[in-house]
Each structure stands twice: as C-alpha cells, then as structure tokens.
Image: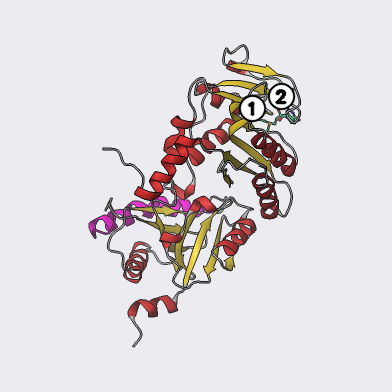
Amino acid sequence: MVNKNESLQTANPRAVLGYCRAGFEPDCAAELAAQLPGRIIHAEAGSGYVLVAPTDAYYSANRLSLDQYVFARQLVMTHQTPITLTGNDRVTPLMEAVMQLLTQERIGALSECRVEYPDTNDGKVASRAAKAIGPRVEDTLIAEGVVADASSPYRLHLFLTPQKTAWVGLSHAGRCPADLNGIPRLRMPSDAPSRSTLKLAEAFQIFLGEQADQHLVPEMRAVDLGAAPGGWTWQLMSRGLRITAVDNGALKGDLVDNALVRHVRSDGFKFVPPSPVDWMVCDMVEQPSRIAQLVAKWLANGWARYIIFNLKLPMKKRLEEVDRCRQIILDADLGGRPLQLRIKQLYHDREEVTGFAMIPSRRLRDQAQRERREGPRTAA
Ligand code: SAM
C-alpha cells in the first residue's frame, strides 16, 4: 500500500528554491546543483530565483544551510510545481498548500511565516500581491495555530511570482536568515563618505553575526587597502579601530584629520604593515585572482588575523572564478594554523562577491570546539 506522504511526494517531487541577485541565476543554480547535488529546473536570467531538484528525493529543510553557498540569499525546501493563484481568492489555495506541506513533512507548527517575492523589476507586481495578502495569510495561520510557535525550528515561506504562481516551502531557522526575501535591512549612515560603507556593514553582520563586538574591539588596528573615498574606513572608525587607509585617492568627510585614521598614499599591492595588525580590508578594483593572491600573502605572513575582501566579477564564468580565488587562499602556507574562509554575494554587492578569512585565536578555537561538543551557550 502507498503511504499518503509518499503519494504526495511522487505527485509533486521536492525542489530547493534559491533567491539570488537578478542576473546571477546561472551561477546560483550551478552552485546548488553541484553541492546538493541535484538537477537544475529553473535558472532564467533576470528572474531573481532558481529551482533545483535534489538527487535525494527525500532531501529536507534541515539539511539546507545558507552559509555554504556564495550566490544564494535564501534557500527554501519546496516542490517542483508551484501553485497557481489566478482566482480572486488567493488565500484559500495558499492555505491548502501549507496544510498539505505540513502533512507531508509531519510538522505540527512553524515559528513564523514570510510572504516573499523576487528582487527584480517584475517582482514589484508580486510584491504588491504579497503586501495585500500577506497579513490575511498570516492571521489565518495564527488562528489555525500553525505559526508563532517559537520552539519550532521551521519557518514557512510563501514565494509569489509575477506570473501569479507561488511556491510554498520551509527553511530551518538556525541555518537560513530571517530577513524578508533574504535581504538584510541596513540604514545608510548620513555621515559616511560612500554607499560602499553598507557592503562592509553587511559583511560584519553576515560573517560575524552577534559576535561582531568580540571581533571588532576599539583600539584594534586595521589596514584598508583601496580606501578612498572612505566608506569602509568609516565603518572601522565608527567602531573605534585605528586605521591605516591606503589609497592614492583622497578620503572624504569626517575621515580627513581624524585621530583614528592615517592616510597613506601608496600602492595597496606593495604596502607592508610595519607590524602585524588585527584587520585588513580590501576593496581595490583589480583582477580577482590578484586580490586572492594578496589575501594569501597577508595570511601567510601573519600580517592580519581577520581579512574582508571584495572580488569584482565582470567575467562570464563567475562561479569558476570564485572557486579559483578560494583555492588560491586555501593554498596559502599558514604553517599549520587553521583558516576559516567564507565567500558570499552580499545584498549590497553588485557584479562582485565579498570574502572573509579568519585565523581564529586559541581562545576562539577552544570555544568553537566546546560548542561543537556541548552546543552553543545560551544567555541565562
Ligand atoms: N571601499 C571604498 C569605500 O568604501 O569608499 C571604495 C573603494 S573603490 C571601489 C576602489 C579604490 O581602490 C579606489 O579609490 C582606487 O583608488 C583604489 N585602488 C585601486 N587600485 C589600487 C592600488 N593598487 N593601490 C591602492 N589603491 C588602489
């Protein structure tokens, strides 16, 4: 006899929905298909999302972790065929699909619900629909006792498209971000000299999370390669770090004559810090592999323990280029010291990605080991 869950599964097999920057769908889909592994179903350029069918037909949301992917902003476990929302009543079909999903996944409750849409010009149609029906869907789910269970690790996603279809799926709250559409909301500081400042602010949020204050401590020393006009230097300065800003171009605003900032007019590839610093950040516009070699050199020489760097990707084979740069950095001779490396296309990145390399201190290594053994410490 065919069990009900299996027949649901066969009728509409599983798929992973990935949200990404418009234009990066082929890279996002190729990365997902290689790592899940799986087969690409949708990777239409400009749509802002991809769909990949995992080879394992029973792949589940708790195996999807955003950290390991470069191009995806959010990952949702869903089905290959979306539901259609062409009638006047869009709430009923959405609710039916949610109930079917919960039955199939044997899940009783969800922590929260996100009604989302692609981050594209066309997506604005879906964004209007999401704003119109989102509160009604959420109220119905709360009334049914399906969402708002803080102890549930699962989050519900209803992803509406401009073609009046919707995917209904799940993400694991500990492994995927809570931000609507996978986009962190950051406020542009009024006195920062450039919008690029948001890139470094987002990098701190994504790579350091709640521990940012432990890793960015006033009086730490930093070098900013390719600093002008100073958006990244401003971020470091606002946290009280002492910065050497290297660029032949001029710094702007509050950074000129600032006691925490020393401007050095020099070539960032030739600059050598007189003594090791805590942080190096680099936003020079250069070939990605040259930047990766520079990062590898700084790590190998022990010149910095934390590095955030931007790789500009004007070429077609962006995933291959990122992999090549990752390998250059991983090949750095660190004399046996461990290295943590993550590369991610941030929301504030355009044709580029941002990397974070860290050589953890002994204290952080011990803490990470303890957390792996005993689980993370929670506040009392
Ligand atoms: N992060 C900066 C901000 O937030 O304002 C923006 C940096 S901008 C994208 C790139 C900078 O890299 C330019 O100011 C340019 O002068 C600098 N640059 C490019 N090549 C360089 C090199 N070899 N040495 C030093 N600076 C360089």
For the record, the magenta segment spans 123-147
Q: Image height check: is 308 above or below 28?
A: above
Looking at the image, in which quadrant does ligand 1 appear? top right
Residue ID at (72%, 55%): 317
Q: Considering the image in quadrants, where does the C terminus appear?
A: top left
Between 118 and 87, which is closer to the camera in this rendering? 118
Of the numbered discs 1 and 2, the one sitting upstream in the chain is: 1
Front in this rendered view, residue 211 or 195:
211
Q: Quadrant of residue 8?
A: bottom left
- Given residues 361 and 58, the one toward you in this image is 361
Q: Position of residue 130 (x, y in %)?
A: 42, 53
* Residue 66 left/right relative to 345: left
Magenta-span inclusion, residue 146: yes
In the foreground, 201 or 215: 215
Amino acid, disc 2? Asp
Q: Are marks 1 and 2 in contact (CB under 8 Å)?
A: yes
Q: Is residue 357 visible?
A: yes
**Which residue appears at 73% of the width and 22% of the height?**
249
Image point (68%, 39%), residue name: 296
Per the rendering, the mark at residue 44 is none
Mark 1, secondary structure of its residue:
strand
* Residue hosting label 2: 247
Residue 67, given in percent of the width and then of the height, sits at: 51, 50
In the picture provided, is 211 more to the left or to the right than 322? left
Would the CB of label 1 be found within 8 Å of ligand 1?
A: yes
Instruction: Return the residue at label 1.
Output: 224
Q: Is residue 184 above or below residue 181?
A: above
